[in-house]
Amino acid sequence: MSKQTMRDPSKNPAAATHPDSEPNADLRPADAEMTRVLKMSPVRMASDPSSSVIAYWKHDALHDVVAPMADHVLMTFLSGSLRFERRTGKSVVVGTARPGTVTVIPAGSTSRWDIPESLNVIHLYLPQTTLERVALEAGTASPADLMDRSAYPDPITSRLLLSAADVLEGSATLDALFRQQLTDLLATRLLAAHAGSPVATQPVIGGLSPTALRRAIERLHSDSDADVSLAALASEAGLSRFHFCRAFKESTGLSPHAWLRQHRLEQAMNMLRDTNESVASIAVTLGYSSQTAFAAAFRKLIGETPSDWRRRIR
């Protein structure tokens, strides 16, 4: 992730003190503000420079003001139950952070948080431009302001965001494609469930044309350095990211990420069964960051390590 420029909120006192200030270019990026407030770095962070940042935090008690941020913030909690207090210029909320609930902090808003104990939490930082793009691609009206939510019951959105906590498989291509899909799904969910005027997306009608499907699969199937980002796949099909994902799944029964993961698994199994290449070499060939990352991803899908599977199948 490229290094973010951290701004001093004292140089923008109106933004730092007004609870209803509007998002603008002078506001601090959400990941930078959260790092300042929590006084630590996240356990893991992954970003798609064009659309979102996902961060996994294990932070201590918090008693501080979160200054206005340039991004919308969506968060959910991994486990346990914890009472907290949140104060804005309009209200005081005493809530309980627990699994299945989400908190939404619209861009440009500020509040004081009092969290008495440590907390495990997943954050999504979503620029307004991403929300507007997804709304346009989904054929909805311009997105209304997001609602300010504190520990709001929404198990669907919570499960989607929690999936980001353990999906990272050590493959840059697979992980990036998943994050891109997840960002669009969560943006769609925010528009449907957490906007001032909820919007409905249009249903999928038909899948990809045979030509578009063949080209998409050829690109996903390529062992070269072909761009398999969601933007590249959608552009080649002449569709938006939103409609490409839906049409691809309608045609194949799988999302682009799930299809590519299945393809990589089949490649791995063929190489383990038919060659004498080491597990480490196969991991490199398939684009995994390490043998450990490859083994963990393989075991998650198959139930045993690559070495154990090879011994059993031969």
Image: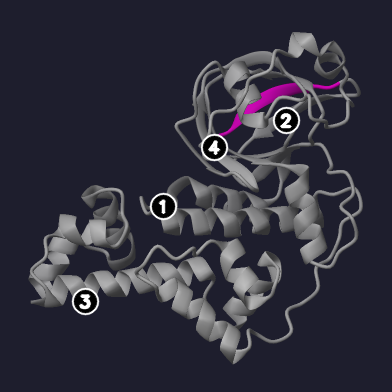
> Which residue is at the front of the view, 59 or 287?
287
Residue span colored magenta = 81-88
Q: Secondary structure at mark 2?
A: strand
Query: Which residue does the numbered mark 1 point to in the structure image?
Result: 172
Q: Earlier in the sequence, mark 3 or mark 4?
A: 4
Total labels drawn: 4
Query: Which residue does the numbered mark 4 point to in the structure image?
Result: 55
Q: Using the numbered discs, state the Cα–Cα distance from disc 3 to disc 4 in whole angstroms.
A: 35 Å
Q: Earlier in the sequence, mark 2 or mark 3?
A: 2
> In this view of the protein, can residue 257 be seen by the observer?
yes
Examine the rendered structure and indicate whether residue 116 appears above or below residue 109.
above
Point out the frontmost of discs 1 and 2: 1
Examine the rendered structure and indicate whether residue 235 appears above or below residue 154.
below
Point out the frontmost of discs 4 and 2: 4
Q: Earlier in the sequence, mark 1 or mark 2?
A: 2
Q: Earlier in the sequence, mark 3 or mark 1?
A: 1
Please provide percent x and percent y for residue 191. Answer: 80, 54
> In this view of the protein, can residue 245 be seen by the observer?
no
> For residue 10: magenta?
no
Examine the rendered structure and indicate whether residue 268 appears above or below residue 102.
below
Seen in the image, is 77 located left or right of residue 107? left
Please provide percent x and percent y for residue 277. Answer: 11, 65
User: Answer yes or no: do the residues labelled 4 and 2 have beta carbons within 8 Å?
Assistant: no
Amino acid carrying label 1: it is Ala
